[in-house]
């Protein structure tokens, strides 16, 4: 499968919104928007990300089809990475390939990632990319409407 990154275009937003409000995806990701169905909030959030010089945001394509998004951003002085792959593309190695491409694009080290502790698939992607577990904390997860354990991972 040919995985590539490119800037997010306005035409991508409908598909990305659908990905980010899929109930199974929301539950797995856990740390999501307060209301995944709020298109106005989604559009405003994406506009802020796309305009910020501290955010590297890319569309992920797989064989030319929009499969999701990947980003690096600064939070409290640390650069973090995140990705969201549409459920119809799960299990094909796309997240790992997209993350590898993002790691080439963003030279900052160390890089951090946070993931729901029970999201084994995402933890596996991060471990394969060289991240190691450096901690855990309990945080409120909008996608589950409760506090859950979050695994903190570091690269470099």
Image: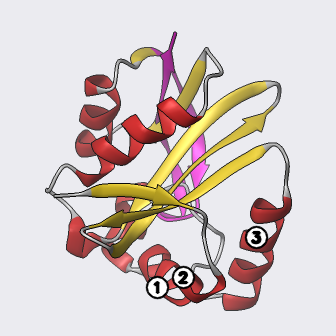
Q: Position of residue 144 (x, y in %)?
A: 47, 63
Query: Secondary structure beneath disc 1?
Result: helix
Query: In 3D space, how far apart are the residues under numbered discs 3 and 1 (Cα atoms)?
Result: 15 Å
Q: Residue at x 66, y 71 (%)?
A: 34
Please tell me how crowded label 3 is: few (under 14), some (14-19), or many (20+) other residues with Cα within 10 Å: few
Residue range in magenta is 134-156
Look at the numbered discs 2 and 3 and tell me whether their residues touch, using CB distance below 8 Å: no
Residue 71 visible? The answer is: yes
- What residue lies at 56% left-to-right and 36% top-to-bottom? 105
Residue bearing the label numbered 2: 12
The residue tagged 3 is 45
- SS of the residue at dot 2? helix
| Between discs 2 and 3, the one toward the N terminus | 2
Q: Which residue is mark 1?
A: 15
Image height of 75 relative to 144, above or below = above
- Res. 30 mark: none
Q: Residue 100: which quarter of the image?
A: top left
Residue 10 rendering spot, x and y as whole percentages: 65, 84
Direction from residue 68 to residue 112 in the image, left or right: right
């Amino acid at each position: 499968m040919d995985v590539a990154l490119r800037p997010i275009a306005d035409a991508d937003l409908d598909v990305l919104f659908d990905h980010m409000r899929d109930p199974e995806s929301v539950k797995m990701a856990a740390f999501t928007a307060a209301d995944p169905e709020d298109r106005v909030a989604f559009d405003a959030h994406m506009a802020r990300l796309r305009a910020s010089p501290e955010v590297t945001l890319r569309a992920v394509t797989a064989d030319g089809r929009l499969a999701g998004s990947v980003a690096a951003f600064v939070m409290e002085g640390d650069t973090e990475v995140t990705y969201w792959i549409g459920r119809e593309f799960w299990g094909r190695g796309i997240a790992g390939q997209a993350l590898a491409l993002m790691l080439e694009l963003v030279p900052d080290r160390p890089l951090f990632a946070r993931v729901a502790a029970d999201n084994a698939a995402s933890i596996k992607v991060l471990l394969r990319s060289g991240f190691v577990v450096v901690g855990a904390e309990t945080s409120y997860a909008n996608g589950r409407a409760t506090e859950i354990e979050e695994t903190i991972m570091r690269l470099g």
